[in-house]
């Protein structure tokens, strides 16, 4: 039986390795038709829903995850025996996908997120982020008594949900920037329709921010740099535009990441080469809400999905001139770091070290 102490991701991966190989082979065996792609896309919500059930229980999780994979393998094998590979038309696009240069990666990443965010419901856009952000700030005792005097940057703002959340929490002005023109157009539209002032959006890269040094009192980047070609450059840019004495906020994916991230890696391989639009439509067809589709397809279909250790991030922060960094140990209820803080059974087997959320200063 696994004990609940910090573990290396490798150990979790080794524990589910055999099953995940067999699962990936059985999805590949389905072939290249649109029916096969539909079956692969349906694996994503099946695995997510079942994984969440396993992670929410107090049982040791590896056996539960192995069982999910076994049930799926047996379903996929019967689909193959019953001729799914001879149904429909050829759809798989492995050979045509080329994501090997910076421009293409940024373009694909921007489109992927822009389309996911565009579908967000009004409450997922306006209400949920304010609650999440407020909870994360309060539980980590971050003092924002002077927020109304602060200019905030939301670096990699996507569809702008946290840009508006900062403004709704009382920031003087918030600027959102993202590589995704779809995301930015949608963010502008929502803010204009609502008549919210004090918020601005522009298209641009977080790896080359179009702002002078020392421009912002608060520089926020939530879940962005691990999807870029040079995350350390992104951290350096965030620090450069922060005013001395200001507050930086950085969220990056964790390593080790436990069962949760091992399963995401399996899904990434399982869905590799699939058409993203087709995958999104398949999940919508199943009646899955759009913010949940975002949650399921976010990391699974994005070209780059780096996972970093706290030591790597802290070394980078030091190198680029940040000061007084603090790794946040609390989160909103469903954040992995909060499940670890609350000492859920097997929390570290399930979630590794939990999200890398840092606040830091400069000077
Ligand atoms: C997981 S989303 C997070 C969006 C937003 N921070 C949020 O929490 O809702 C990642 C975002 O990073 C953006 N992104 C990726 N690479 C970028 C780059 N080089 N410059 C600016 N934005 C980038 C994507 O377009 C996407 O909107």
Image: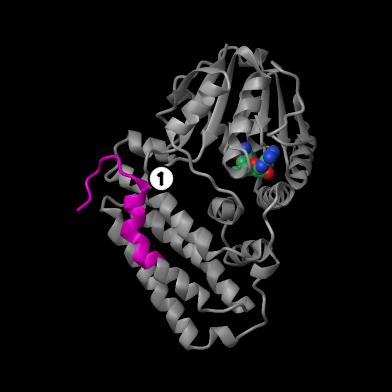
Residue 205: percent from the left, percent from the top?
A: 72, 36
Residue 267: percent from the left, percent from the top?
A: 49, 60
**Magenta region:** 1-20
Q: Is residue 203 magenta?
A: no
Position above or below: 166 against 30: above
Q: Who's the residue at 57% across and 79% down the image?
A: 31
Position above or below: 243 against 317: above
Q: Is mark 1 within 8 Å of ligand 1?
A: no
Q: Residue furthest left?
A: 1
- Asked if residue 170 can be seen in this view, the reply is no
Determine the main secondary structure of the stretch shown in magenta: helix
- Indicate the secondary structure of the residue bearing disc 1: loop
Position above or below: 335 against 42: above
Residue 182: percent from the left, percent from the top?
A: 76, 47
- Asked if residue 102 can be seen in this view, the reply is yes
Number of residues whose C-alpha sits closer than 10 Å to that of mark 1, classed few (under 14), some (14–19) or many (20 or more): many
Q: Which quarter holds ligand 1?
A: top right
Residue that badge 1 annotates: 257
Dividing the picture into quadrants, the one containing residue 140 is: top left
């Amino acid at each position: 039986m696994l004990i609940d102490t910090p573990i290396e991701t490798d150990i979790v991966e080794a524990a589910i390795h055999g099953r995940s190989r067999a699962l990936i082979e059985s999805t590949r065996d389905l072939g290249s038709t649109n029916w096969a792609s539909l079956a692969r896309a349906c694996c994503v919500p099946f695995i997510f829903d079942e994984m969440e059930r396993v992670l929410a229980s107090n049982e040791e999780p590896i056996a539960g995850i192995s069982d999910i994979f076994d049930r799926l393998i047996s379903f996929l094998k019967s689909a193959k025996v019953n001729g799914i590979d001879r149904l429909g038309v050829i759809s798989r696009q492995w050979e045509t996908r080329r994501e090997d240069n910076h421009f293409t990666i940024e373009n694909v990443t921007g489109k992927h997120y822009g389309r996911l965010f565009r579908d967000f419901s009004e409450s997922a856009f306006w209400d949920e982020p304010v609650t999440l952000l407020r909870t994360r700030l309060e539980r980590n005792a971050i003092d924002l008594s002077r927020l109304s005097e602060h200019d905030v940057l939301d670096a990699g703002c996507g569809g702008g949900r946290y840009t508006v959340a900062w403004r709704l929490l009382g920031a003087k002005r918030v600027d959102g920037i993202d590589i995704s023109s779809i995301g930015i157009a949608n963010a502008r539209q929502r803010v204009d329709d609502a008549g919210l002032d004090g918020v601005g959006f522009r298209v641009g890269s977080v790896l080359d921010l179009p702002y002078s040094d020392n421009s912002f009192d608060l520089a926020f980047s939530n879940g962005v740099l691990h999807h870029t070609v040079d995350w350390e450059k992104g951290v350096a840019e965030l620090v450069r535009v922060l005013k001395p004495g200001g507050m930086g906020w950085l969220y990056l994916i964790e390593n080790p990441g436990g069962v949760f991230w091992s399963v995401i890696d399996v899904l990434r391989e399982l869905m590799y080469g699939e058409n993203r639009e087709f995958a999104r439509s398949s999940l919508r067809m199943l009646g899955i809400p759009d913010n949940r589709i975002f949650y399921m397809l976010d990391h699974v279909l994005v070209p780059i999905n780096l996972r970093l250790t706290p030591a790597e991030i802290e070394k980078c922060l030091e190198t680029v001139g940040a000061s007084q960094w603090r790794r946040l140990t609390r989160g909103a209820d469903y954040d992995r770091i909060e499940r670890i803080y609350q000492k859920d059974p097997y929390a570290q087997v399930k979630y590794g070290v939990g999200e890398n959320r840092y606040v830091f200063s400069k000077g």
